[in-house]
Amino acid sequence: MKIAIIGGGAAGFIAGISAAAKNSRARITLFEATRKPLDKVRISGGGRCNVTHNCFDPLELVKNYPRGAKELLGPFSRFQPREIIAWFEAHGVLLKTESDGRMFPVTDKSETVVNCLLDAARESGVEVRLGARVKNIESCSENSKSPEFEIKLSDGARQKFDRVLLATGNSPQGYRFSAALKHEIVSCVPSLFTFKINDARLKGLAGVSFENATLTLENSSKRKLEQSGPLLITHWGLSGPAALKLSAWGARELHEYNYHCKLKINFLPGYNSNQIYSAIAEYKMQNGRKRIHSASPVVLPRRYWGQIAGVSGVSETDTWSGISRATMNKIVSELSGAVFMICGKGIFKEEFVTCGGVKLSEVDFKTMQSKRCPGLYFAGELLDIDGVTGGFNFQSAWTTGWIAGERMVE
């Protein structure tokens, strides 16, 4: 049996290794167009490689996927973080868990993961062909029991294979191959990005962070788009888990708005407006002689409190005894429901994640085989699956790649 894997990323490599472990007689060839395989693995996690996340309950794990949650539930019951952790440990790579659940190699070096996968592929007998750009893939047989494919390379060489796995990530070439082999492609748009915001309330506050804030897209008429979590002010706007999660769940709506829409932020999600007002009023009664800018009466970064006091009309010398009810209400409004205008998007570090890809209803997630083209398999980001930050995108690649590898050599 001859197997072709197109794409030398996380999904492609784990699929090749899985296939070789399942069937030692299979001849497996992995085609990577560039000379640098596993490039996304190298740069992920700031060069440390966020391998996965320590969430071992499939029902909880799928909640981190804006698209693909339903389809991944079954695959995660067979191959999830627990299995990939064990696999890496068996191959000499120990992982550690950080406070937010992300898991990295104990070396804090992505090269540890890259070298492990390269070595495992070589030891398994997987032929890795670098600089081998696939130009075209044709299905040569209508017989579902004995499918055959012909692959044409950019140098003109042609080879025939019994099974083909597409694991090309978000490469346009992979979408072209899929469409030519009878698959519908859900349009791709960016996911997992930061928000560009030009607003005086954020000016000069880069680096200020909030332990918890709730962000809501105000322009969404289709469904309520809201996320909570840590928030970070940057030189260009807002980042942090809350912003990134909202960008993922609202990827299509934000694209539709051309990344220009209103964003409402509650900086104190544990309190309602009346509770915030009462806390400020009580602080005023007890600290009438103190300057308003000197300290926040609620749990809030001091620098942000000073900024909000200033935009609410409070001078540096004003004391609590002189603050008006109208000013207090304005401050409450700024803390519980401040409205900002998103005016664009930024890239999250060096990583680029998209939503969109091969339509999920056209894939059998028990095997990762196409329902439209027998002998064709899919894995990784080429599918219309994407996760939030934290190792979830890699986990879907490990899972779909592993299952595809095992089933395509049966």
Image (tube, helix red, strand yellow):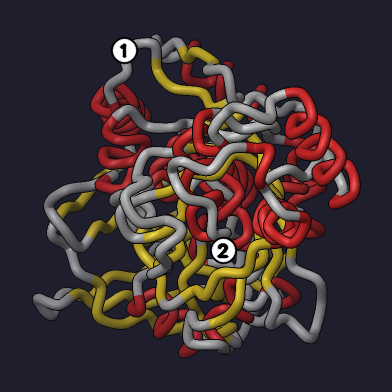
Is 291 situated above or below 68?
above
Q: How many marks?
A: 2
Disc 1 versus disc 2: nearer the observer: 2
Disc marking residue 247: 2
The answer to which image quadrant residue 202 occupies is: bottom left
Mark 2 residue element: helix
Marks 1/2 in contact by CB < 8 Å: the verdict is no
- Among the 4 quarters of the image, the one containing residue 362: bottom right
Q: Which mark is residue 351?
A: none
Left or right: residue 364 versus residue 356 is right
Residue shown at 69%/25% (left/top)?
287
Residue 375 in the image: above or below residue 295: below
Mark 1 highlights which residue? 107
Q: Position of residue 340 (x, y in %)?
A: 55, 69
Residue 42 in view of the camera:
yes
* Amino acid residing under circle 1: Thr
